[in-house]
Amino acid sequence: MGHWLQRNVVEPGKLPLLLALTAFVLTFLITRVITRLIRAGKGPFGNISSGGVHIHHVVPGVVLTVAGGFGAVASGQYGFGSSACAVVFGIGTGLVLDEFALILHLDDVYWTEAGRKSVEAVVLTAALGGLLLVGFAPFGVNNMSQEELDNRGSVLATVAVNLLFSVAVLTKGKLTTAVFSVFVPFLGLIGLVRLARPGSPWARRFYRRRPRARARATLRAYRHDRRWARPRRLVGDWLGGKTDAELTASAGRR
């Protein structure tokens, strides 16, 4: 294990990334445990308030993210300073993304269905960080030979084509596929040939006068959402805790 870590993480200069990703995931998990204990009225933890204002943990998260980011830039790529800043950055990012939904809605939706966006953002970020750690580079650059990398025209053309794929998939309303296609361009090609989601910019532009395509897109989205509704809810409950509505419904059935 130590040899693998040295060869694949330390030597390529990925130790700060590993530390940041580990700190990010652990911070999210620990934060969710604490918030669930506070919600249940257990343990020594409690909400922090100042002058009657509830201070959400996104506030110290922003401070730590800024400090860790600027510290990493100032300290360089290697050394203890870079690793320490990576940990600080990971902790701050974990605190911020745990309340991503609150930032998105500008409202305290932490324990609502809308609050599940925070869990999705954390899972997506962790997955992307994992792809970077194992060697995936954005826009398929990692699949190019050294000769191709030395040719700036080839690099720019590869990045441009893969970026267009990702943007096109994004206009189809497929956010997750678009994000992952940045690192795995083949996913962008798959998303590009499949139907767009109803209400997406692509559907409004190209399905407006195609009722059959619009109907197929609506039916496919319905089946997809129904198929994945239960797994998403189970993962959301396990990682983030049940929503207020779910707890109320559970209490009503008792």
Image (cartoon, grey):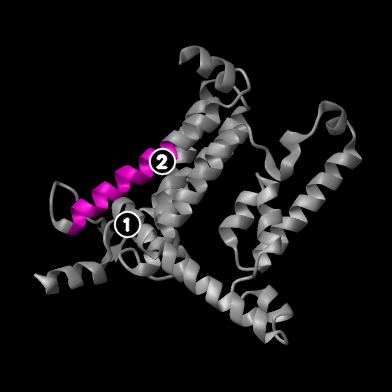
Query: Label 2 sits on what residue type?
Result: Val
Chief SS of the magenta region: helix
Instruction: Mark yes or no: residue 198 visible.
Output: no
How far from the left and from the top, in percent, is residue 3?
A: 51, 12
- Say which residue appears at 24% left-offset and 68% top-offset: 246
**Measured Cα–Cα span from mark 1 to mark 2:** 19 Å
The quadrant of the image that shows the C terminus is: bottom left
Mark 1 or 2: the one toward you: 1
Residue receiving disc 2: 25
Q: Tell whether label 2 touches label 1 (CB within 8 Å).
A: no
- Say which residue appears at 37% left-offset and 38% top-offset: 26
How far from the left and from the top, in percent, is residue 56?
A: 34, 58
Tag 2's secondary structure?
helix
Instruction: Mark yes or no: residue 212 visible.
Output: yes
Task: Name the one closer to the observer, 245 or 254.
Answer: 254
Instruction: State yes or no: residue 31 in magenta.
Output: yes
Query: Label 1 sits on what residue type?
Result: Leu
Q: Quadrant of residue 194 in the image? A: bottom right
Q: Residues within 10 Å of mark 1 (few under 14, many from 20)?
A: few
Left or right, residue 157 beside residue 135? right
Label number found at residue 234: 1
- Say which residue appears at 24% left-offset and 56% top-offset: 47
Left or right, residue 93 beside residue 160? left
Instruction: Write the start and end of the magenta stretch as one range.
Output: 23-39
Q: Residues within 10 Å of mark 2 (few under 14, many from 20)?
A: many
Q: Is residue 83 above or below residue 197?
A: above
Tag 1's secondary structure?
helix
Q: Is residue 135 above or below residue 247?
A: above
How far from the left and from the top, in percent, is residue 41?
A: 13, 56
Q: Is residue 229 above or below residue 21?
A: below
Instruction: State yes or no: residue 207 in magenta.
Output: no
